[in-house]
Image (spheres, rainbow, N blue to C red):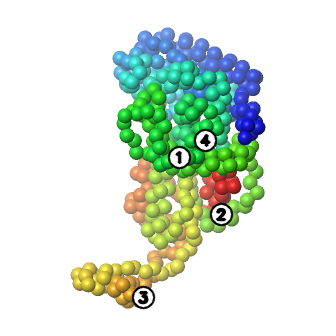
Amino acid sequence: MSSIINYAKKVVTPSQKLQEKKLCIAKKVCGLISESIEKYPQVVGFELGGSYAKGTWLPEKADIDIFVKFSKKTSEKDFRNFGMKIGFQSLKKFKPYTRYAEHPFVEAVVNGTKVNIVPCYDVKKGDWQSATDRSIYHTKFMTQQLSATMKGEVRILKKFLLHIGAYGAEIAKEGFSGYTSEVLISHFCSFEKTIKKISELKKGQVIGKSTKKFDSAIVIIDPIDSNRNLGTAISIDSLAKFVLASRMFLKKPSKRFFSKPVSSRSMKNVDKIMVVQFRFKDRSDDIIWGQIKRASNALKTQLELGGFTVLRNSSIKDEKENAALIFLLHAKKIENSLIRVGPEISSKDHCEKFISANSKKSQLMWIDENGKIKSLQKRKYSDARLFLQNLLKNNLKNSGIPNGLEKDFKKGIKIIDADKVTTKSIKEAIANIAVTDETIFH
């Protein structure tokens, strides 16, 4: 195992050249922010934050986050407006754009590196006024807590999580954030000890100390806020990937956990996949991802109510306003008849209602060995494509599609087979649900 971990250390350690490049960019942007904030008496300073400031950044995930600190007396309106103005003024040479979390912030790409300028309040620990106020304290805590060796261990853990598709707390991923990775290493001290603990995980296990009780598959307490559970943002899927991958790595350590393998497996299940494609009006990532995930789950429910077995479902969007809902079915076409089960014959009123409601539709009606009335009827739709077309064209209001997506759907959708998809991001999403993950199930 030690040789594999040493290999991983080399992979995750940024080169001296890259470190110098990032430092140059950070200094440049900090200088621009210094000039911009002079016009705003509400601003009390700014600080570098995130993984760059803590020294836990991955070479391929090297964003630079800068937090502009506002006086706690600043109104929320000024906090938002001035935060945005400072961001746009500081980064005006680099085509800045707005990003959204709890509050909007400004992002730009500076010499190939994403730079985020984020407003926060200058408050005492625990007196949070916005979600970003903790970030400064996260940076201070980890800077003091993590030794140089532990920072390397964080990088290894992040790379491991990234490779198995469980890295990132954004709603698109619902995985382990960079900060959560740091918390795990600060608690368990090394990558190896962390994955050993995770491999033996019990449901609802608590990592850290808090007097408050939380209801999530894993509870990871934020060390600078004992009332905050970092595990809330982690999906069962991401947690399960981490648990299984940890067990596999401990059983048979391999470089494939840190480098992308070339899969030799063909996608045998593509012929069972239906894709609902549409374009959406641009909006914040958190909003659109929330909407398309809810839409995918709603249509899964509708398909199952229609008699189709949905094995897996997912959703995807790209940067060009293309989105897709993806369904892996047990079969696209099912029996054209179904059996409705009625009441027991002892229930007089219910029997009469069932017979009255189903006699005209019934191809055959009988009493089974348990004394229940049954009716054999023709399905309205035995083809998944026709089922979805009817639902989304004639019954969109009752489909469960979020209200925010209705206008997008009404502008036009395509229901197509997986092998007809041409968009790269959608193809990748199809592969993710059609092919066994060899890193976990090897």
The crowding category of the residue bearing disc 4, from other C-alpha atoms within 10 Å (few below 14, some 14 to 19, many at least 20), is many
User: What residue does disc 2 label?
Assistant: 270
User: What residue does disc 1 label?
Assistant: 201
The answer to whether the residues at label 3 and label 2 have Cβ atoms under 8 Å apart is: no
Q: Which numbered tag is attached to residue 419?
A: none
In this rendering, the answer to whether 363 lies above or below 398 is below
Amino acid found under the numbered disc labelled 1: Leu
Q: CA distance from mark 3 to mark 1?
A: 52 Å
Badge 3 element? strand
Q: Quadrant of the N terminus?
A: top right
Mark with earlier residue (1, 4): 4
Amino acid found under the numbered disc labelled 3: Gln
Mark with earlier residue (3, 4): 4
Residue closest to the eye, 333 or 243: 243
Percent x, y of residue 99 = 52, 33
User: What residue does disc 3 label?
Assistant: 363
In this rendering, the answer to whether 372 lies above or below 310 is below
User: What residue does disc 4 label?
Assistant: 195
The residue sitting at 38% across, 79% down in the picture is 341
Mark with earlier residue (3, 1): 1
Badge 2 element? helix
Badge 1 element? loop
Amino acid found under the numbered disc labelled 2: Val
In this rendering, the answer to whether 102 lies above or below 243 is above
Q: CA distance from mark 2 to mark 4?
A: 34 Å
Mark with earlier residue (3, 2): 2
The residue sitting at 48% across, 22% down in the picture is 137
Q: Quadrant of the C terminus?
A: bottom right
The residue sitting at 76% across, 23% down in the picture is 17
